[in-house]
Image (tube, coloured by chain):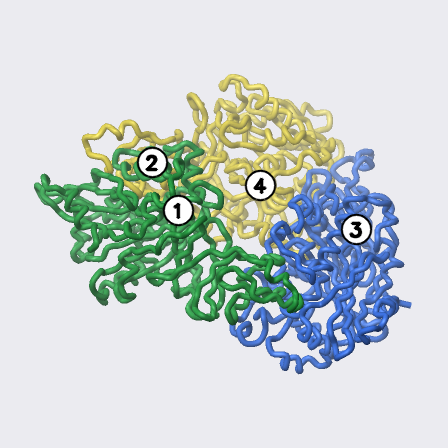
Chain colours: A yellow, B blue, C green
Amino acid sequence: MLSPERNRTLTSVGPDTPMGNLMRSYWLPVLLSSELPDPDCQPVRVRHLGEKLVAFRDTSGTVGLLDEFCPHRRASLVLGRNEEGGLRCVYHGWKFDTSGACIDLPSEPPTSSFKQRVRTKSYPCIEAGGAIWAYLGEGEPPAPPAFEWMAVRPEQRFVSKRLLECNWAQALEGDIDSSHASILHSRLNPADYAEFEGARELLYFDGDRYPRYEVFDTDFGMTMAARRNAEPGSHYWRGAQYIMPIFVMIAPFDDPLPQMNMWVPMDDGNTMVWALHWHPDRNLTQDELERRGSNLYFHCTQFEDGTSEAGSSWIPKANSRNDYLADAEVQRTKMYSGIEPLWCQDKAVQESMGTITDRVHEHLAPSDLAISRWRQKILATVENPVQLEELPGRDPQTHRVRPPHFVAPENADWRSRMEEESRIA
Amino acid sequence: MLSPERNRTLTSVGPDTPMGNLMRSYWLPVLLSSELPDPDCQPVRVRHLGEKLVAFRDTSGTVGLLDEFCPHRRASLVLGRNEEGGLRCVYHGWKFDTSGACIDLPSEPPTSSFKQRVRTKSYPCIEAGGAIWAYLGEGEPPAPPAFEWMAVRPEQRFVSKRLLECNWAQALEGDIDSSHASILHSRLNPADYAEFEGARELLYFDGDRYPRYEVFDTDFGMTMAARRNAEPGSHYWRGAQYIMPIFVMIAPFDDPLPQMNMWVPMDDGNTMVWALHWHPDRNLTQDELERRGSNLYFHCTQFEDGTSEAGSSWIPKANSRNDYLADAEVQRTKMYSGIEPLWCQDKAVQESMGTITDRVHEHLAPSDLAISRWRQKILATVENPVQLEELPGRDPQTHRVRPPHFVAPENADWRSRMEEESRIA
Amino acid sequence: MLSPERNRTLTSVGPDTPMGNLMRSYWLPVLLSSELPDPDCQPVRVRHLGEKLVAFRDTSGTVGLLDEFCPHRRASLVLGRNEEGGLRCVYHGWKFDTSGACIDLPSEPPTSSFKQRVRTKSYPCIEAGGAIWAYLGEGEPPAPPAFEWMAVRPEQRFVSKRLLECNWAQALEGDIDSSHASILHSRLNPADYAEFEGARELLYFDGDRYPRYEVFDTDFGMTMAARRNAEPGSHYWRGAQYIMPIFVMIAPFDDPLPQMNMWVPMDDGNTMVWALHWHPDRNLTQDELERRGSNLYFHCTQFEDGTSEAGSSWIPKANSRNDYLADAEVQRTKMYSGIEPLWCQDKAVQESMGTITDRVHEHLAPSDLAISRWRQKILATVENPVQLEELPGRDPQTHRVRPPHFVAPENADWRSRMEEESRIA
């Protein structure tokens, strides 16, 4: 449990909050590149870390991320016209480039020097891995993120996004919690797993529901290792990497693709969840693509507004207003939740806690060690500020990891193996 | 009029409020038994006295009422799986019985004693009269309620429920106010009453619009007697019993069936209204059933979501969003309100006052004596706490009353007759 | 920019606020006369200056404007029955005439004097120019408003109303700001103006986008004169009159009809916008009527609820929930905003600023002189109270003005001409 004050510290991400300051020390993803498909395309409203922003792609293809509101009279630049080299407010025509400089101010005479005195707030952006990343912090941004999925060709990865209507922290806590996999994502009858080809992991989850955790600090954040009994005399080790401040790597499940999730706070009550799968060496197979495009496993691909890609509201078709399309009969006979898509099982429990969960009245158990250690770690980081360069996970060299999982004899040196299998050449 | 402070005292029902404490000293109805139709059926979300709860019926048929949120990580147990002997949280599988004890905790080893340290909030429930009643207070609950309708067979009663989107007190005040019957529920042309077979009462309401009240304290709460002129030389006396804290008995109207209403506070801004009719000695007739199932008199039987029974949102089809389906032409030519269902006439005026009516700026008249006496009574009760056993209406022996009404000569001993006709053998 | 405190002073219109008091010193329009079409028609809910009111037309045709809530038990009189000489509350039948006197109180005996002690809040109303005007202030109201459009026959004017979901002040500021016409209301290709017969003004707007302002105080408020270059050696002068507290006269545009807008605050976050065109001497032509009825220029004639007249919600079909039906392709190729109706271009930018715009973080330019002078003027008026009679624009004699515009040689005495053309004989 946390005190009300520390729960607030953990969950508040706006400007001038301790956690908000930590978030602002990293490059974070704000949009898919495909949401700004072409030079001079329509600008897009962005809600990020409690700030109201507008993103646009200029004529040269460069992305800008500005204060949503024109510094002149505060009309929204989401209504703006994206034209030759900048975004123009449609109210009086003031035009800004991606750096926030005012490059046209037609409501004053050409001879006026007023234009030079006008700037708008702008944040540096980069594009990498099919995503647009922004740095909202003070000082020099770090080098760009360098996760493995960002380096592979688009054909080697699968990316999806969805809106989660609750605070980021209770969502991320679900991701570093291996023990819920044995219930929330489980079938009542283990024989049902036969349909999941090669889903050895599911049987381990089912056979041993109380994983023992080993958690250790790393230069990117923390590694959580969950140990379960496997075949007699051996253990199933499952690693997850928490990379500060919002990234979690999850070991493969059901096929050889590792997963990374990004829990991007839009504000204190809404989170944009990015799910990523990739193969380091080859294109994804048709089967791998179909499974991920099916809306049933880790990726939401059906949205409330009927669209499925850039331009969507990113609100899943199954959401709290329709009780996540849960089926009582399926819950009675087949699975714990009655909610079919795996990602939606997580969404349902995470949102059901309320916008910000009441950590004062919870009861953490020994199997919640990863969660309690994670809170200690991130709260210690925001409560005891260090030099930016010393922040775990800020140096992209630390991103070169991959989530390991393996079966090993009981007395094996699991930790060496985990570290070795985590490292990317 | 009340001061703002006393209006707050009257209307606030959450935990640790004076009125909330009074409410918690009684068994109150929370669900129809039919809302939990079978052992191990789906759990149901309950909003009651400002608390968020979940109700379920276990394998043995016993009803449990728990904190909505699992004490582990605060996922909602409304998503839970109701299985062999308890309700299981679908997040990590913690399972609770109706007493709030944790009876399975699969995320820890079987050898762990952690389970014994976990309990969740649970409230005692009983079932009687086709309803589930809960006791949310401190100490030993009283004996179960014993209203007459609870003792008869289901064929002898008619029960309905509906959501009212305002505070409970302004709703109950409508129920103990006989004078509005002469206007709100009246026709413009008394000849129209001919269609109501035997509706002698309607003619009395119409013929004498300013009832004189006699109000006296009883062991259950208060009796309100409204006197109107009847045939020359005689009075029509109409009794209503207020049984603490939320029950009102209403004299028959239009046929021989007495009525009881229960104004159950869900929170300070929403009230679940239960309407009950019954016959002490025989089944209801087809005609009596049809009249009550018609949606036009006292019972709401048409809901916004198209369902009409357990599982409904209980939001009436006619509500504030559609101006109660009022018909201006009917209002012009036939009745004061233009709203057809009688219960909905009450709903419309009660909700129109706002979520919590402004008792600071009202003007009570002599004909509002019952209301002002009721407020005095209930506010005195919460402001001067007594022993639980001394609370009016807490002992179910006091529930054995029936609402009387009769025509008597002007100089008759009306009060003796009222007391006599109130008493159930 | 303003301080947060002065921004609050400028934008708060409720009872007992400085700006609310100024507003209450004038007759302001609350309804179209056609919204209360007949004697004894249905009453209408009115939201005005942060107060909840109900308007009705009594049997004699007189309009009453009362507190929405019955002084008895606070039921809404919007549910009331409008009958012989007054509005009757449907709860207990208390009936009020247009003066707020209680003229029937059937829940008390006829001999009771209680009725004499009951009054409800009522505000004086007048009808003129097809509108119902109310005076919510202290003391004697001034003589009725006497704008030119009020004196002409209905066939000589065109009136429309629409709801604007933001504060009144940022809306009115758009009206006294000539410079935005060169962008927000402009086409990308000046050749497109050919379709606007006689739209000489549009070419001036396009040819000179940085108007120079001359602003001077008058007995009604202020006159703003915007000067643009016209043909060589001449200026195009465009006058707008701000008549305290919410009226703006706009020079003709595209045909000879002057315009007046009324920015009526419903509360701090909603404004009823009235747009008026008229011809002083003749009926409007079919062409003039069609243009105004087309929904494309200054008048909103398509509403969300499908109705188009009295009884409408007055919510435009194009609104923030549907992104003002903006067309990205039109924005790319034809006009700055992509929003077709001219009035909706204003609505979009005004609402996009948020409910109350953040005047602390704006940057006014020299071309915003009219706006900064307007704020100085109105804030000085509320911050330095004067006698009611001294308030600009309160005496209807001052209303006899008309917005002038003309092309004049560079060295002409523009100000004398503007004053002369403003005056109505």
Residue drawn at x 60%, y 24% is A419
Q: Secondary structure at mark 4?
A: loop
Q: Secondary structure at mark 2?
A: helix
The amino acid at mark 2 is: Gln
Residues indicated by labels 4 and 2 sit on the same polypeptide chain: no
Q: Position of residue A50 (x, y in %)?
A: 49, 35
Instruction: Say if B220 sits above or below A203 in the image.
Output: below
Give the number of the mark in front: 3 or 2. 2
Tell me which residue sits at (47%, 40%) in the image. A283
The CA distance from mark 3 to mark 2 is: 66 Å
Which of discs 4 and 1 lies nearer the camera? The answer is: 1
Q: Which residue is mark 1?
A: C168
Q: Quadrant of residue A138?
A: top left
Chain ID of residue with mark 3: B
Are the residues tagged 4 and 1 within 8 Å (C-beta)? no
The residue singled out by tag 3 in the image is B64
Q: Nearer the viewer, residue C38 or C175?
A: C38
Say whether mark 4 and mark 3 are on the same chain.
Answer: no
- Residue C114 is tagged as none
Residue drawn 58% across and 46% down? A297
Q: Badge 2, how many Cα within 10 Å: few under 14, some, many 20+?
A: few
- The number of callouts visible is 4
- Residue C376: which disc? 2
Identify which amino acid the numbered label 3 is placed on: Gly
